Image (tube, grey):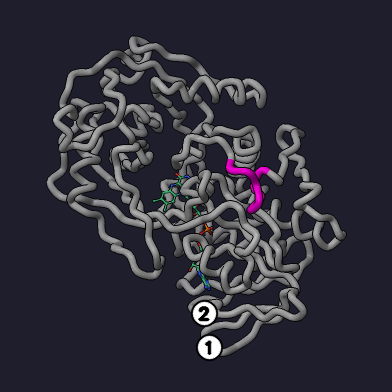
Amino acid sequence: MARSGRSVICVDKGSGPGAGSTSASSAIIRFSYSTIDSVLTAWESAAHWHAWHDHLGVDDPDGMARFIPTGMLIFDTPNGALHRLTPLWDDVGIAYEHLDAQQIADRFPALDVGSYFPPKAVDDPAFGNDAVGELTALFDPSSGYIDDPLLAARNIAYAARHNGAEFVFHREVVAVDLDGGRVRGVRLDDGSVIAAPVVVNAAGPHSAGVNRLAGAERDMTIGNRPLRQEVFAVPGPASLTLERGAPIVADLDLGQYFRPQVGGTLLVGGTEPECDPLEWIEDPDHFDEHPTVEKFETTMHRLARRLPEFGVPVRPVGLAALYDVADDWVPIYDASCVPGWFMACATSGNQFKNAPLAGKFMLALIEAAEQGRDHDRRPVQFRGSRTGRTIDLGAFSRRRTPAVTSGTVMG
Ligand SMILES: Cc1cc2nc3c(=O)[nH]c(=O)nc-3n(C[C@H](O)[C@H](O)[C@H](O)COP(=O)(O)OP(=O)(O)OC[C@H]3O[C@@H](n4cnc5c(N)ncnc54)[C@H](O)[C@@H]3O)c2cc1C
């Protein structure tokens, strides 16, 4: 937005760029979504991560975040998620391979190829049952991850400053000034006022509360709320390291995902299997930021099923953070019922990868509103530079009919 010539002020109650949930992100760049607009958004965004310097237009002297290519292995499950995915990838032109159990074992010998579906709680007597069959998988060679999500956010802030944006940290937006129902600016916790005809709510897990400050939640048909998550870093098997070509693994068969990282460790997180209670949080300023023994044990037992060589560490090393989850796990990039108020929120644990397009989407929505276009009736269409394909921004509307998705972080 700063690059488009606008006067931009970013207000964040945190200590610096990316210090919110972005700093906890697993930063996986993948294309496995349930809807065509989400697949296209991720695929278009990836091109910007590959050309990060060109995307930003500057080099941050503190270093640049890097895309680490790994590919991604997605195990199929009896509910057949992959059958919905491959037509979308065929449509967009995303390459993939189908692997049977033998091919998975040949390529990634550290992986047990047994199917244990459905995922079970560790105290379920059936948890230790033998495999009910063998897995098949999709392998997508184009996925990977960003080595440092916090640095990526700093890079974006550096580029924004270079284009004239200002940053105000340690200051909280506590009220919204309205005039005749239109946004006039925001009030901060020190009593100061920032006048602005356009305000974008990008408050992450706080965004539902921030929308309420403006009364912008009134006509939303999609709700969003914070969900607590835990992610662990563990020493992986010697044959499954980044250096030896380990992929990201989406193990919906056991209800989790893991990815390699530098130094031989694996990062492991959950995919909301039905057997795991969801930990909704009322107040995003108050939640337990420490990983729990219970979640650690569940995660480690599941990982040990998939990786027989894995030695369970004695202590949990990990973090707890919040997703900002939409009812259908699709983000909201939209205007609102309050003129001048926009939202980039409900990122549902899966929108780090779309950071390169989020600002472009919001700019397109703001410009359309300024030209008098009613996005609710005539959704803005965004043209992707990689594919030339159109992304229907109505797919990310706050007033959409809930999308049919996996109902999990996979989107
Ligand atoms: C554990 C975890 C793993 C994830 N893994 C992935 C992944 O592998 N791939 C992927 O694509 N996505 C992933 N995500 C999701 C991704 O990280 C988020 O979608 C993204 O980082 C959200 O960015 P954001 O800027 O919207 O929110 P945030 O980074 O949370 O930033 C919001 C900011 O708003 C500020 N704020 C809030 N309220 C106020 C207020 N009233 N006034 C002023 N400032 C305020 C906060 O201080 C914060 O800095 C993951 C998320 C988590 C938590």
Q: Is residue 265 visible?
A: yes
Vertically, is 367 above or below 29? below
- The answer to whether residue 318 is left or right of residue 360 is left
Query: To which residue does mark 1 refer?
Result: 190
Residue at (31% x, 50% y) in the render: 230
In the image, residue 396 lies in the stretch drawn in magenta: yes
The earlier-in-sequence mark between 1 and 2 is: 2
Q: Where residue 316 sits: x, y (%)?
A: 20, 50
- The answer to whether residue 142 is left or right of residue 177 is left
In the image, residue 158 lies in the stretch drawn in magenta: no
Whether label 1 touches label 2, CB < 8 Å: yes
Q: Where residue 158 sits: x, y (%)?
A: 59, 63
Number of labels in the image equals 2
Q: Which residues are magenta?
A: 395-402
Q: For disc 2, does the CB lie below 8 Å from ligand 1?
A: yes
Disc 1 marks a residue whose amino acid type is Asp
Identify the element where label 1 is drawn.
loop
Between marks 1 and 2, how big is the CA–CA gap? 7 Å
Query: To which residue does mark 2 refer?
Result: 171
Q: Is residue 50 visible?
A: no
Residue at (62% x, 57% y) in the render: 220
Disc 2 residue crowd, few under 14, some 14–19, many 20+, Cα 10 Å: some
Q: Quadrant of the N terminus?
A: bottom right
- The answer to whether residue 210 is left or right of residue 5 is left
Magenta span dominant secondary structure: loop
